[in-house]
Image: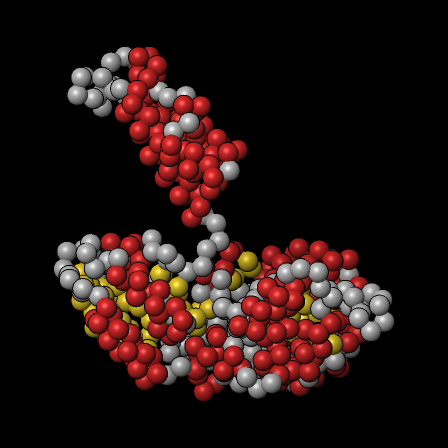
Amino acid sequence: MPATQLLRSLPSIDALLRTREARSLAERTGLPRLTALARSVTDELRGELQARSADARGANGTLSREALLAEAVSRLERAVAHADAGGLRRVINATGVILHTNLGRAPLSPAARRAVAEEAAGYCTLEYDLETGARGRRGARAEELLAELTGAEAALVVNNCAAAALLVLSTLARDGETIVSRGELVEIGGDFRVPDVMAESGTRMVEVGTTNRTKLADYERAINTGTRLILRVHPSNYRIVGFTAAPALAELTALAREHDLPVYEDAGSGALLDLGRYGLDEPVIRESVKQGADIVTFSGDKLLGATQAGLVVGRRALVERCRRNPLYRALRADKLALAAVAATLDAHARGATFTEVPAMRMLAASRADIEKRARAFLRRARARLDVGALRFEIIAGESAVGGGSAPTTHPPTALIAVTHARASAAALEAGLRQARPPVIARILEERVVLDLRTVAAEEEPEMLDALATLADV
């Protein structure tokens, strides 16, 4: 059939939108959005018809209008499903990666969720003082808790740690030089590089030392009348081992005092407690402040266990200079983030870090704890499911901290390994991703593996529902 005759059979956008399926979709998506998707679908079909010969024919030797309409409806349904899937959706993280960047890093505690939904979602005291009836300070509660927990004189909250670094460098070192070790010029996710943010801040980077060894004398030789700041960056997402050397923070701050210079530590993930017992070698912020760091920045959605935020603590004079920088207004945190951060900090202040903050509770869970949960889960699965072709076993494995934190730390865990008599591991993993809610798993040696370290107890019934859909694949 000539292409022109095929094109005459192509349904119009109006005809497509009048179908029963399209009318149902319109209730979910809204007519303007559905019309745009319908236009895209018909344009796609038109292009295919123009490009191909008539080998996709109906029984009578032609590609009927009805067949084309059915194909257009099918594509429209898939387009709507794809568009919906692109939005933010809750998932069950069964990967064992605690601070999974692609899945939103640290999950919020119940208290933080309540603070966001009940206190901050509507009108709230974001910048209002109830006692005086006058304007209050944004983020006052979170900042007070930060200062208390870190031993700093003052604190400030912005929208992420990269923003905090940009603000500090712009405030303290613009139009001057910042000294930094070559071994600390890190790159983190999303192509964010320390040299790039330094350039954007308006400071000139002065590299000292080598990749693996930097001495105190290297810093001292680089100091001149143009020096404004000494920067120390914690390499959160990698480790250099072997023949290495770097001055202790206390040595660096003593040198800076001799030259009347501030020291800025970008602690990356940072931690409010010493997590060495769990294999983590991350800066404890209170210790950084105690050792003389004038200003320290770290993340809110990593080892703190809150939402995305950049946390700045240090000497009051320097923190207030950052607050007065016009750039702060562009980088400041909103009411939802401030509510979540304050609620999480409150848990830390009450000594409830490992009972109320999910990320910390996951980190502290032992392999025995997780295996006990895994065995109980499998008992429920076998009792409920007509297992069919599904097979389960518990195997030893490793979790990960994630989020650019503790790259060499892999907490031992117990994994639920799932196989199917007929379906591949890839098909099972894809099936779990299509569940409601989606379950995100890993594939290990041609088996789908589920790590309950990162699955909340209340999510286990939903994960069981997802597995039930795979039993008869």
Q: Could you tell me which residue is drawn at 48 percent across and 85 percent down?
A: 276
Task: Give the residue at x 50% y 69%.
Answer: 106
128, 361: nearer the viewer:
128
Residue 142 position, x and y percent, is 68, 73
Q: Is residue 207 above or below residue 27?
A: below
Q: Is residue 117 visible?
A: yes
Chosen colour scheme? secondary structure
The one nearer the camera, 39 or 244, is 39
Q: Quadrant of the N terminus?
A: top left
In the rendered image of this protein, does residue 286 appear above or below residue 29? below
Occupied quadrant, residue 348 = bottom right
Residue 91 lies left or right of residue 113; in this view the side is: left
Give the x, y percent position of residue 77.
Answer: 37, 38
Instruction: Classify residue 441 by image quadrant.
Output: bottom left
Residue drawn 74% across and 80% down?
153
Up-down relation of residue 299 to residue 253 (above or below): above
Tell me where residue 293 appears, x and y as whole percent.
68, 79
Residue at x-position 48% and y-position 49%? 87
Q: Tell me if I can see residue 222 in this picture.
A: no
Left or right of 287: which side holds 399? left
Count the numbered circles shown.
Answer: 0
Tell me if 99 is positioned left or right of 331 in this view. Answer: left
Q: Quadrant of the C terminus?
A: bottom left
Above or below residue 69? Residue 192 is below
Residue 70 in picture, x, y percent from top left: 31, 29
Can you tell which quarter of the image residue 134 is in?
Answer: bottom right
